[in-house]
Amino acid sequence: MERASDTPLPLAFDGVVLHQRLRDALPELAERVLEQLVDHVPVYDTMPAEQLKEIRRVVEQGIGFFAAMLRTGWLPTDDQLLALRQSAAKRAEEGVPVETVVRAYHVGAQECLRQMLRHAVPDDLAHVQAVTVLVLQYLERMTVTVVAGFFAERQAVLGEEQSARQALLTALVEGADVAGTAARWGLDVPPCYFILDLAVGAHPDEELDGVSPVIAGKRKLRRLRVELDRHVDGTVLAALSSAGGFALIPCRTAPDHVTEQDWARVAAALSHMRRVAGADIMAGAAAAAPQDIPAALTLAREVRRVAAASERSPGLYRLPDVLLEYQLMRPGPAREALARLMQPLTTRPELLDTVRAYLRCGLSRRDTARALCVHPNTVDYRLRRAAEITGLDVTHGADALRVRAAISALNAAEGAVGM
């Protein structure tokens, strides 16, 4: 047991010991505390009568522990506080916020203090000071007990929720018994999922000297997950690392009825993820019914790789966005022939990089110059030399599409895309 204070006991106001005052007023005090909670803390006014009766018992226990502390000078032990810890765990299971649970104990302590102070007289100043210290010590013990009980239960609930999500995700990705898995865990399966295959770039902190890239990467990953859950309706199923992964976003319409507005919302969520995580994200996307997730995940991954290989900017891409490149980059003689068109530039990386930058910058020589930190005349010279070597002039509309396809094929041949 732990001594609460070195103050001589018993403490009394106006000649009457305080623990007796609290004992005598216990039913009235408990009722007032409950009324305060119902009137001023939103969650409590929606609780059923049976639950309020249980909370009243907990309030009475808490006041009783404080009265005993005033009598003995000893703080309540962990064994004595077990009931309060269990009550906090129940509130966590019921979804009551932790701040609401903690506030209830502060309301109770304030009512006890008011009950005692109304009897204090000027000669009781030393005892008033001592009682104030005891109230603070008691609140410290109560807060630690309640928060520990609350989060122990919450952690258990989260662990079960995570297990359920993981089981459903595995069933969806492996094409297993989705309906049976969902029923076993009590989960709802929507008619459609948006499938995102993600490649996440490095946050600047991950490349700073003296900064742990592991810690910076984990912080980036946490932000990605938080933003994904925040901007999406329903339960997101994801397997993510700091470098990427995939996510299944629920959709309440069938795949054939997904609209451009639906896709715009997914793109907006991805934009929030990029901004908050502070990193570029390239995403391949598809929509599919639960039973078609494995094939859709493969398609989304291929689309993402094609978008990256064809020098697209970070963002969300679907098959229609890269349709030509996707077809041209399938393994075979056509892709090999396209790759050979740009092969001569592989020995002149400054020329190849300039052509790539020119395509990324929308065929703007000034934007290309800024991106490469060179003079626009240097860009013009390099593009002319590339045209002389390959026979394809990326500045001419007739050749631009062919050059883009050839570079995409070259990237694929070099291993940027494995399809």
Image (cartoon, grey):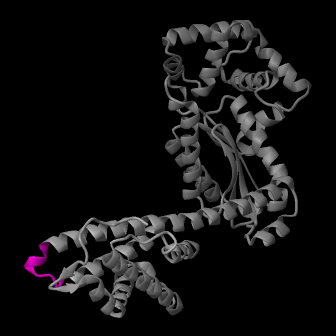
- 260, above or below 285, in the image: below
Q: Nearer the viewer, residue 5 or 40?
A: 5
Whether residue 198 is visible to the viewer of this picture, yes or no, is: no
Residue at the spot x=54%, y=64% of the render?
151
Q: Relative to residue 253, is residue 286 depicted above or below?
A: above
Residue nearest the observer in this picture, 169 or 303: 169
The C terminus sits in image quarter: top right
Along the horizontal axis of the image, is 1 left or right of 226?
left
Horizontal arrangement in the rendering, residue 30 relative to residue 10 (left or right): right
Instruction: Establish if 261 lies above or below 221.
Output: below
Name the residue: 88% across, 25% down. 334
Q: Residue at x 46, y 70 (%)?
A: 77
Q: Residue at x 50, y 25 (%)?
A: 208
Q: Quadrant of residue 111?
A: bottom left
Range shown magenta = 118-125
Is residue 124 one of those drawn in magenta? yes
Name the side, left or right, on which 372 lies relative to 28: right
Q: Is residue 312 visible?
A: yes
Q: Position of residue 67 (x, y in %)?
A: 34, 81
Of the pair 183 and 257, the residue shown nearer to us:
183
Q: Is residue 71 magenta?
A: no
Residue 173, image x, y percentages:
81, 53
Image quadrant holding the N terminus, namely: bottom left
Which residue occupies the extreme left position in the image? 122
Give percent across and percent down for residue 324. Answer: 77, 36
